[in-house]
Amino acid sequence: MLQRIQSIYLLFASLVLFALFIFPLAHNIFVGGKLVNVSVTGVYEIVNGQDKQIQQFLALTIITVIAALIPFAVIFLYKNRKQQIALCYSAILLLIGYSFWMAQTVKKVVGQIQLEYKNMGIGLFLTSLSIILIIFAVKAIQRDEKLVKSADRLR
């Protein structure tokens, strides 16, 4: 059923991952004498209040789109709950690896500069929120599976 709570969790997980294109991973950092923001699409230099892209992260951008589409696609597999659960666990593993890759990318751009809490962007925390939402979806799918099995026993 498409109107179940796990569909809402999976939709929000997908939207949170797409929000990575809006929110920076790190902002207002001085790198090489330039004030920059780091996003999943690249490194942007702040010039007169405008962002000018100085480095592009094509692979990170593509993986972000794929990672955001997986929870959305899982919504439509509602007839096969076991496959839904397996894909949710796969998405969680993908997001853990993706978070590590994202953190290493920011670390590589920043270099020896110590990244302070005030310079960390919301984007660094969005993958964690998405993982939590997918875990909630898995729990809801498992409850549905348990309900269907108990109804089958009664027949």
Image: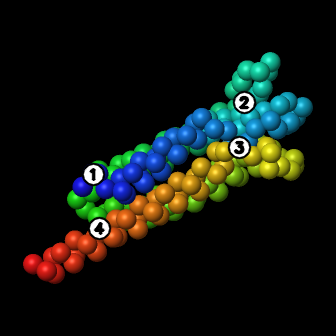
What amino acid is found at the position of numbered circle 1 in the picture? Answer: Leu
Q: Which residue is mark 1?
A: 2
Residue at 35% from the left image edge and 53% from the top image edge: 7
Instruction: Name the secondary structure under disc 3.
Output: loop
Location of mark 4 (residue): 144
What whole-number distance in Å separates the C-alpha atoms at marks 2 and 3?
14 Å
Q: Quadrant of residue 121?
A: top right
- Earlier residue among tags 1 and 3: 1
Label 4 with label 3: CB-CB less than 8 Å? no
Nearer to us of marks 4 and 3 is 4
Q: Are marks 1 and 3 in contact (CB under 8 Å)?
A: no
The disc, 4 or 3, on the residue closer to the chain's N-terminal end is 3
Q: Is residue 111 left or right of residue 102?
A: right
Amino acid type indicated by mark 3: Gly
Q: Could you give the CA–CA distance between mark 1 and mark 4, rounded to whole angstroms? A: 12 Å
| Pointer 1 or 2: first along the chain | 1
Question: Within 10 Å of the Cα at label 2, are there few (<14), some (14-19), or many (20+) other Cα atoms?
Answer: many
Picture coordinates of residue 113, whole percent (x, y): 87, 47
Q: Disc 4 versus disc 3: distance between alpha carbons?
A: 37 Å
Identify the amino acid type marked 4. Asp
Q: Which mark is residue 121?
A: 3
Quick check: 71 left or right of 23?
Answer: left
| Residue 101 in picture, x, y percent from top left | 64, 53
